[in-house]
Image: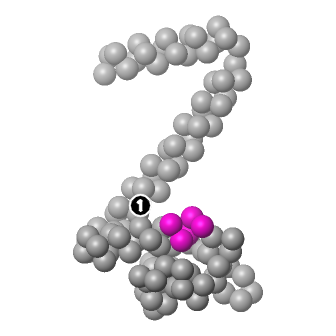
Amino acid sequence: MMLDERDVVARVQRVHLRELRLWVREGWVRPSESENGPIFDELDVARIRLVCDLQKDLSLPTDAISVILSLLDQVHGLRRELRTLAEAVDEQPKETRRRIIEACRSRAAQD
């Protein structure tokens, strides 16, 4: 489902239109663009709710919110990369998968 700014404000009642626009300018939320303005998807709405929690419930300063969002983006990026790697490993022959698992366990034991 795609939502415009006013739909988002109606759905996430804790955010005001002015705040939403600021968060987009700050890069905290990255909606798609249409000829009628920004369009938000479900992931954007979830991120807006997270920013509301961080800013309004936890009263975190702006710079802390930026750091937290950046770290979360990195974690999600790493998860995507690991999923891709796991899928590539799953496509390998059984013996190759076994050797990869053994090598991972061996390296983990060294740490």
Q: Residue at x 41, y 13 (%)?
A: 106
Q: Main secondary structure of the magenta part?
A: helix
- Circle 1 residue: 70
> For the C terminus, which image quadrant?
top left
User: Quick check: is 54 in the magenta stretch?
Assistant: no
> For the N terminus, which image quadrant?
bottom right
- Percent x, y of residue 64: 29, 67
Q: Residues within 10 Å of mark 1 (few under 14, many from 20)?
A: few
Residue 10 figure quarter: bottom right
Q: How is the image coloured?
A: one colour
Above or below, 24 relative to 90? below
- Percent x, y of residue 102: 49, 11
Q: Residue at x 33, y 69 (%)?
A: 54
Can the viewer see residue 62? no
Above or below, 26 relative to 83? below
Above or below, 102 relative to 28? above
Residue 3 located left or right of residue 72 = right
Residue 35 located left or right of residue 6 = right
Residue bounds of the magenta highlight: 42-46
Q: Residue at x 34, y 15 (%)?
A: 109
Q: Residue at x 46, y 19 (%)?
A: 104
Can the viewer see residue 17? yes
Residue 24 located left or right of residue 110 = right
